[in-house]
Amino acid sequence: MKVFLVYRAEGATDIYLAALPVGLGIMAAVLQGEGVSASVVNFTGNSWRQIENLLTTQRPDILALSVFTHNRKTSKRLAREAKRLLPDCWVICGGPHASHAMDDLLAWPGVDAVVIGEGEEVLREVVRARKHAANLLPLASIAGLYLASDADHDHLARSIRAPIDNLDQLPFAHHGLMHGYGVDLRQQAEFIITSRGCPSQCVFCSSPNFWGNKIRFRSASSVLQELWSIQNELGLFYFSIRDDTFTADRKRAIEICERIINEKLYILWNCQSRVSTVDEELLGWLKRAGCECIQFGIESGSPRILNLLGKKISLPQIRQATSAARKVGLQVSVYLIAGVPGEAATDIAATEALLAEILPHDGQVSPLAYYPGTALFNEAVAKKQIVANIFASSSSEAIYVRTDKEVKPTVQRLLACLQRVEKSAAYQYDDFIAQKDRLGYCHATNLQAGEWFVARGRFADARREYEEITHQEPENPWGWLALGELAVTQSQWHAAADALQRVHQLVPRHLPVLHTLAEVAAAAGNRRQTTKWLAVAENLDVS
């Protein structure tokens, strides 16, 4: 049996939208553990002709589509085209939008079933049923699975599946990505998830309803095993932890950081969190362990708007969290929301004032949108402000709460404010000195200071910062990588080759450094070395 786990975000250029959901890799690995030929497929960027060619050539028996609100239109077409091309292929939809707009998707042409919530165990049972049963009857008994053929949906009341309690039992996502189409394996493997769920109940977010009321955590041991596995197998040493709230369990977050430091896993990474779940000590642990950026959803500087959004955070908490993050030297990124009903000029001004005070290094601004499964959507339907099937009747990628002409200028105004404060937000050398006094030696701080010097042409000072890393931690690839890149900017080819070869010795499967070594050898006129490094890169197993 052949299974395709498919995602497509038509026209997506943002890396977070264009990349595969992490869960697809996990589900593929689960099925591969069952001896199933399971492949992840990212059709983002592919033409419909290319999609048709792959489907008709590979002929999957099951096509599992990952459906979000933003990609529901292209997913609907994928389902229809797959069934047209492969009538015997079983098309199943899952993901946040599928879970909360099940009836809409069950009516899509070509869709055979919808999965609600977590898909690993459901998909495992679907494959077993399709593989061993001569009819569809066993499928109706699978908890969490809803069949288009069950017109009356009479089994819905008994189809709720309990969330997976022990997340450590799941395989690592990157192992499921080894066999795929349209997947940049190394770029995709940077994204990891160490927990499921969120402790908050924001009215605009469907995460609590999708993952369940209880946040579940992977153990620190499981997280470290995954990080080591990715580095050893794929050569990565930068990661993005995409948990809704990485610091929700303070003790576990510190344990992960301690393990990273004690096991000498020299990485850089970023994460998301809530201002109500951090403090200076915790943020200091994150920074020492290589975290260089933290993203906070602050949404607004107006207490009234925060209350309307159900954020349950206060302006003092925002100030304290961002101040603590700046003290330890983390890059602070913020998420903002515009276009809230009743939003006044004073609310927007309050957000601008808050940004000028807390000085984030960057941020994003999004208009408030409806998503199925959110309190915001459910309340709007109850008040008859929108119809329940609005996502089926609308072809818009997003359905915004407000569509008046004031929303776009508000978004632009807040983006302009973010750009203004970025200049003042940038760390200066005195800040790095203070961070070192506060935290002690930390390779992330040295790298930041070195970049500051490079930007000002002070290469000797930058070299001093990077050399401190190599002296303190000779096995840390970041110090050697920074020295190598610095030497390249100065056309010091011999020094660059020496430093970059150290990176290769420490992390043999780090592909970018091999390409840089080839470029350095070519610039130095060494054809033999150029050929050597290109051959090593080409022969590096990326399957």
Image (cartoon, grey):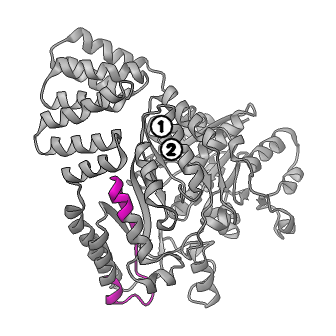
Query: Range of the magenta residues?
Result: 323-348
Q: Which residue is mark 1?
A: 261
Report x, y in % for residue 48.
49, 49
Helix, strand or loop at label 2? It is helix
Question: Quick check: 157 above or below 300?
Answer: above
- Left or right: where 405 falls relative to 540: left
Instruction: Using the rendered view, name the quadrant where residue 391 is placed.
Output: bottom right
CB under 8 Å between discs 2 and 1: yes
Q: Secondary structure at mark 1?
A: helix
Q: Residue at x 15, y 14 (%)?
A: 525
The outermost residue toward the front is: 437
Q: Residue at x 46, y 47 (%)?
A: 240
Which residue corresponds to the image point at 21% horizontal and 17% vertical from the top-left? 521
Mark 1 Cα within 10 Å, few/some/many (few <14, many 20+)?
Answer: some
- Give the vertical position of 220 relative to 35 (above or below): below
State the CA–CA distance, disc 2 to disc 1.
Answer: 6 Å
Q: Residue 257 got which mark?
A: 2
Front in this rendered view, residue 61 or 260: 260
Identify residue type, mark 1.
Ile
- The numbered disc on residue 154 is none
Which image quarter holds the N terminus? top right
Inspect this view and state whether residue 359 appears: yes
Coordinates of residue 294 in the picture (x, y in percent): 41, 56
Location of residue 533 with respect to 401 vertically, above or below: above
| Kind of residue at disc 2 | Cys
| Furthest residue toward top | 528
Residue 533: which quarter of the image? top left
Q: Position of residue 20 (x, y in %)?
A: 52, 47
